Structure formats: structure tokens, C-alpha cells
Image: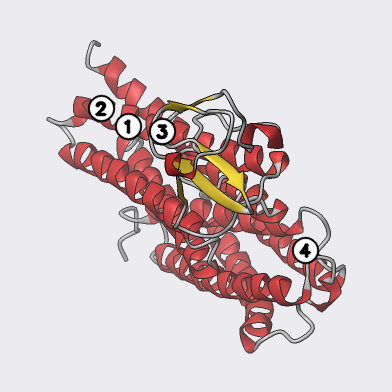
């Protein structure tokens, strides 16, 4: 009985960590939609503060003011960092400051700053959740050592993800690095789902038709290809936004590259493959909830993609499209875990 409580706590923390990681993905999508990625131009602090400013005046130089080392001001359209703790005199002394050299982005927008700050806050909360989960994983050390080892690998992965977040800021939102950051989030989702599955392997599962695990793997593989192509299309759109402007939405895909058309057409293959999988699952008598959710998400994903192309990127369509892809990946990956090892002998 005493052993059961820590195990239950671990399972709860694994699920909480998964929810928190998905919340970070959602927050990241909102950050990207609102153009708030550079709301905090430094990392891990925000303009040198643990709690970011709310008014532009907080980032201006003032006489007779206490400044802490690392605190940031905006002066002559550049970021300047306090070299040490000091009190400012009546006149600005450049010897107290050094220019921020990671990049030359020096704009303050309270909405963008707090949107990005909330994203980082959720990331820190997710990291804390994963760390608590890893500590709780020692309850499995004797029975399922793989859970303990893998839990600490997730902690390392979260640390790596944090470093990737810093490189995104330092690169001033380079599209390739944003894509890598998103891809790592999906890897972390997969690892957490694996841990949740391994920690809950006490139910006897009904043997499946041998074609079901194969088809589940194929549907997941197709979705990963679709996500990769989608990130390439998103990178192209980001480049068009830079070239054409944020208000010319009708022109963002006017000269789309080949991968956009492949991505659009490939969604049909993804849909019909999953419909066939649903048919086999219904026929086999498996639980239908997950495959029903998968089909609903795929349809919603197609509709949001159509909205972006035919209705010129209506508000919210881009983050919804991304969030749906992340949810689809998670559901399909867990379905793959459930289907493995329960194949009916022929």
C-alpha cells in the first residue's frame, strides 16, 4: 500500500507534465501568431528583469535611480545592459553600460512582452513538473528501472529545449530554429506518452489483428511527413510576411512552392489511411474514442488549412492548425504504443 502511493503520484505528475508541455505548445503558437517572439529580447530574463516591465518608461534611463547588474535600458534604438549595481547620477554615464551584442532588436511592446513572458513562464512550469516527475520515478527503480532512466532523459530534453528557446531569441526568430524548437517539443510529448504508457501497463489488452499495429505506424509516419512539410510551408509564409508585409495576407501563398501543393494534397492520403484504420479498429472491437478523436482532428486540420488558403489566413487559423497537428501526433503515437505487443497470433 505504501509503495502504491508514490507510483500513483508519479503517474499523476507524468500526466500533468504532458498537459503543461501541450500548454507550452499552445502558448508558443499564440506567440508566433501575434508576432510576440521578440517581446523579451534577452534570455532567460526579460529586459533584464525576472518580471518584465509594463511601461516604456521603465526601460528609459533616469537620473538618481538604482540599477542592478544585467538590467536593460533602450537608448538610441539600442539595448544597453548595466555592467554592475549602481545609482545613476544627474547625467548619463556610458561607462556604466555595455551594448547588448546578441542582436540589434530594441523595441518594447507591452503586449508582446507579456505574451512571450507567459510562454516562458509556462515553459518553466513544465520543466518543474518534469523534474518533480523524475524525482517521483525512483519509486519504479526496482520494478521498472527504464521508467526512472527515461524520466531523467526527459529532464535533460527539457533543458535542451530551453537552450533551443534561447537560440531562437538570439537568432531574432530564424524560421529554421523555430521549427527545430517545435520539433523538439513533439519529441518531449512522445517521451512523456511513452512513460505514461509504461507506468500504466497493468491492463490486459485484447489481441489485435496483425494489420492494425502496422497501419497505426503508417498513419503516424504519414502524419510526421505532413508535419515536416507543414513546417516548410510555415517557413515560406514567414519569409513572405517579411517580404510583403503582415497586411498582404492574400499574397502570402500567391507564389507558393511545390511543397505547399504536396502538403495540401497529402492530407487526403492521411485522411483516407486513418479512415481505413478506423474501419479495422471498429471491426476488431477496440476502444473507439482515440480513433474517433483522430478523425475529428484530421478533419479540423484540413478545414483550418483550407481557411488559411481560401480565406487568407483568418485570425487564429495558424495556431489552431499547429495545435491540431501536435494533438494528432500525440494521439497517434499513444495508439501505436497501445497496439504494439497485442498482436493476434495467426
- How much space separates mark 2 and mark 4, taking CA atoms? 42 Å
In-image side of 143 versus 233 (left or right): left
For the C terminus, the image quarter is: bottom left
Residue 69 tag number: 3
Disc 1/disc 3 C-alpha distance (Å): 29 Å
- Which secondary structure, mark 1? helix
Nearest the viewer among 185 and 145 is 185
In the rendered view, tell whether residue 250 sits above or below residue 199.
Answer: below
Q: Earlier in the sequence, mark 1 or mark 4?
A: 1
Do the residues bearing badges 2 and 4 touch, measured as CB atoms within 8 Å?
A: no
Q: Mark 2 points at which residue?
A: 135
Q: Residue at x 77, y 76 (%)?
A: 244
Q: Where is residue 329 in the image (x, y as percent from the top left)?
A: 51, 57
The answer to the question of whether label 3 and label 2 lie on touching residues, with beta carbons closer than 8 A, is: no
Rendered image: mark on residue 337: none
- Between 254 and 64, the one nearer to me in the picture: 64
State which mark lies toward you, 2 or 4. 2
Residue for badge 1: 131
Position of the N terminus, as image quadrant, is top left
Amino acid at each position: 500500500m505504501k509503495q502504491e502511493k508514490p507510483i500513483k503520484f508519479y503517474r499523476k505528475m507524468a500526466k500533468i507534465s504532458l498537459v503543461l508541455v501541450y500548454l507550452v505548445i499552445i502558448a508558443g503558437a499564440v506567440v508566433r501568431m501575434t508576432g510576440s517572439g521578440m517581446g523579451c529580447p534577452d534570455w532567460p530574463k526579460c529586459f533584464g528583469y525576472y518580471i518584465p516591465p509594463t511601461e516604456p518608461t521603465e526601460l528609459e534611463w533616469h537620473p538618481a535611480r538604482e540599477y542592478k547588474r544585467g538590467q536593460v535600458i533602450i537608448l538610441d534604438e539600442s539595448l544597453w545592459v548595466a555592467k554592475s549595481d549602481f545609482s545613476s547620477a544627474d547625467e548619463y554615464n556610458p561607462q556604466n553600460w555595455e551594448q547588448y551584442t546578441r542582436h540589434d532588436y530594441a523595441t518594447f511592446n507591452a503586449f508582446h512582452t507579456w505574451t512571450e513572458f507567459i510562454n516562458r513562464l509556462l515553459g518553466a512550469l513544465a520543466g518543474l513538473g518534469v523534474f518533480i516527475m523524475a524525482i517521483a520515478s525512483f519509486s519504479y527503480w526496482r520494478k521498472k528501472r527504464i521508467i526512472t532512466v527515461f524520466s531523467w532523459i526527459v529532464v535533460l530534453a527539457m533543458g535542451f529545449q530551453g537552450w533551443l528557446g534561447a537560440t531562437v531569441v538570439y537568432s531574432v526568430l530564424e524560421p529554421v530554429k523555430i521549427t527545430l524548437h517545435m520539433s523538439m517539443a513533439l519529441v518531449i510529448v512522445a517521451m512523456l506518452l511513452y512513460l505514461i504508457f509504461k507506468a500504466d501497463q497493468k491492463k490486459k489488452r485484447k489481441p489485435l489483428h496483425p494489420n492494425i499495429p502496422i497501419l497505426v505506424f503508417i498513419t503516424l509516419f504519414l502524419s510526421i511527413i505532413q508535419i515536416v512539410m507543414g513546417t516548410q510551408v510555415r517557413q515560406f509564409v514567414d519569409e513572405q510576411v517579411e517580404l510583403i508585409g503582415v497586411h498582404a495576407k492574400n499574397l502570402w501563398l500567391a507564389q507558393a512552392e511545390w511543397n505547399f501543393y504536396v502538403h495540401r494534397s497529402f492530407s487526403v492520403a492521411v485522411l483516407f489511411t486513418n479512415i481505413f484504420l478506423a474501419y479495422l479498429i471498429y471491426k476488431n472491437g477496440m476502444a473507439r474514442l482515440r480513433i474517433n478523436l483522430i478523425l475529428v482532428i484530421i478533419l479540423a486540420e484540413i478545414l483550418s488549412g483550407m481557411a488559411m488558403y481560401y480565406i487568407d489566413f483568418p485570425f487564429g487559423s495558424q495556431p489552431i492548425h499547429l495545435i491540431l497537428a501536435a494533438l494528432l501526433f500525440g494521439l497517434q503515437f499513444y495508439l501505436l504504443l497501445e497496439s504494439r505487443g497485442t498482436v493476434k497470433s495467426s
